[in-house]
Amino acid sequence: MAQINPSILSADFARLAKEAQAVDGADWLHVDVMDNHFVPNLTLGTPVVESLSRATDTPLDCHLMIENPDHWAPQYVEAGAGSVTFHAEAAAAPVRLAREIRAKGARASMALKPATPIEPYEDLLPELDMLLVMTVEPGFGGQAFLDIMLPKIRRTRELINKHGLELWLQVDGGVSEATIERCAEAGADVFVAGSAVYGAEDPAQAVRTLREQADRTIASAPWACNH
């Protein structure tokens, strides 16, 4: 039921191929793309995504923290991403962009910063395959989880269930053994984990442990029981 997406932002960039293989068994490999404009950090682009797609069989979940995703997002599908997430705050035409990503063969996802409410985007949800609720301010790894995002996760799950959508609800930021159960209880079913995985002695075991925690919580969560 739960999906665990290790974030390579917390990996050793000098050993990305080996770091990707170190989390065999993960559902997706989360790739944070930052342009030093939308967020104050600079990471990587399409050439690295192309290389990663050749280095691992784990599908790539690209989170674009960049300006002008309407132009750039389709290029990440072409580079090998199986899922592409753009930010609601940056997209000029989110419905058109989501449809273009889907038409190119990838899953379309939209992300919301902590201060961005979900309610104005309710009508867009059927156009998406996943909705990402950021549980830290985007831009840097290793930040502490924001508990004040839990009500937002709950509201998002309520909207998903209200419309009967098969829409994944992802959380990203500060996800660890100490916080994943709270996220799962609130309604999340896809979890991005950076330092909690790559900072562990055995990253693959860390993925399994997090998935077991989330699965156990989701199995008894009211939102899942009523789904």
Image: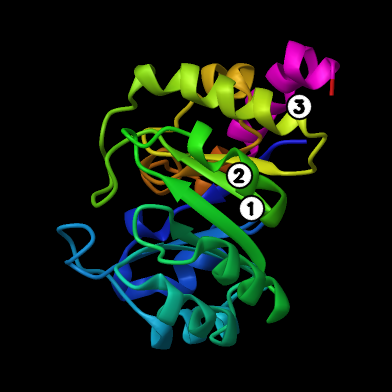
Drawn side of residue 152 relative to residue 127, left or right: left
Q: Quadrant of residue 46?
A: bottom left
Q: Earlier in the sequence, mark 3 or mark 2?
A: 2
Quarter of the image where the C terminus is located:
top right
The kind of residue tagged 2 is: Ile
Q: Which residue is mark 2?
A: 4
Depth order, front residue of 180/62 = 62
Drawn side of residue 49 relative to residue 141, left or right: right
The kind of residue tagged 1 is: Ala
**Distance (Cα) linking label 3 and label 2:** 25 Å
Q: Horizontal and vertical percent for residue 143?
A: 25, 36
Which one is in front in this view, the residue at disc 3 or the one at disc 1? 3
Q: From this view, report whether residue 130 is shown above or below residue 49.
A: above
Give neighbour class at mark 1: few <14, some 14-19, many 20+ (Cα, 10 Å).
Answer: many
* Mark 1 residue element: loop
Q: Which residue is mark 3?
A: 162
Q: Which residue is mark 1?
A: 26
Drawn side of residue 2 relative to residue 177, left or right: right
Q: From this view, report whether residue 68 is shown above or below residue 10.
A: below
Q: Quadrant of residue 213?
A: top right
Which one is in front in this view, the residue at disc 3 or the one at disc 2? 3
* Residue 175 magenta: no
In this picture, which residue range is highlighted in magenta? 208-226
Q: From this view, report whether residue 6 is shown above or below residue 193.
A: below
